[in-house]
Image: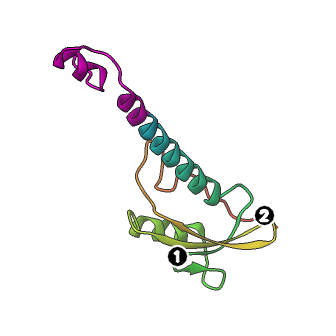
Amino acid sequence: MSEEQTGQSEGSSQAGGVTVSDIQELIRRKEEIEAQIKANYDVLESGLQVDDEIVEFGSVNTQNFQSLHNIGNVVQHSEGKPLNVTVIRRGEKHQLRLVPTRWAGKGLLGCNIIPLQR
């Protein structure tokens, strides 16, 4: 076998062939992408959900809340900065961190917050 043939059979893709190392690299990249997707999904699952009762949103809490304008002001002044949010979800208290960010839709949160109807 010539030196050129040996080089091609040992992993070189000069002739347009796919090597084992090429496939291993693709598998590694696929696993990284899947891990990123899972991490993003986990963030979405742990974020604000329908029927969450917000009891603290940054500096706004149940003691000083007057209107949704309070929350809007906190969001506007916190763009790009993490906000601590406490919610009651199905009877349990959960601590969240939201980062208000511009996106394709309205506002900076990607959701609508409405007053609790009691």
Relative placement, left or right, of 24 versus 1 is: right
Task: Give the distance between the C-alpha atoms of the residues marked 1 and 2, in whole angstroms.
Answer: 22 Å
Which residue is depicted at the point 38% across and 36% down? Answer: 25
Tell which residue pokes out farthest to the bottom in this image.
63
Labels 1 and 2: the sequence-earlier one: 1
- Report the residue marked by disc 2: 117
Residue at image location 74% in from the left, 65% down from the top: 116
| Range shown magenta | 1-26
Q: Which residue is mark 1?
A: 58
Q: Is residue 21 magenta?
A: yes
Determine whether, in the image, residue 65 is placed left or right of residue 78: right
| Quadrant placement of the N terminus | top left
Instruction: Give whichever of 111, 1 is nearer the camera.
Output: 1
Disc 2 residue type (three-letter):
Gln
Label placed on residue 43: none
Q: Neighbour class for label 1 at 10 Å: few (<14), some, many (≥20)?
A: some
Q: Secondary structure at mark 2?
A: loop
| Near-viewer residue (109 or 82) | 82
* Quarter containing the C terminus: bottom right
49 over 33 or under it: above or below = below
Above or below, 108 against 24 in this view is: below
- Which label sits in the foreground, 1 or 2? 1
**Which of these two is toward me, 108 or 117?**
108
Q: Amino acid at mark 1?
A: Gly
Pinpoint residue 69: horizontal percent, then vertical percent.
53, 68
- Residue at horizontal 64 percent and vertical 54 percent from the top: 45
Q: Nearer the viewer, residue 34 or 43?
A: 34
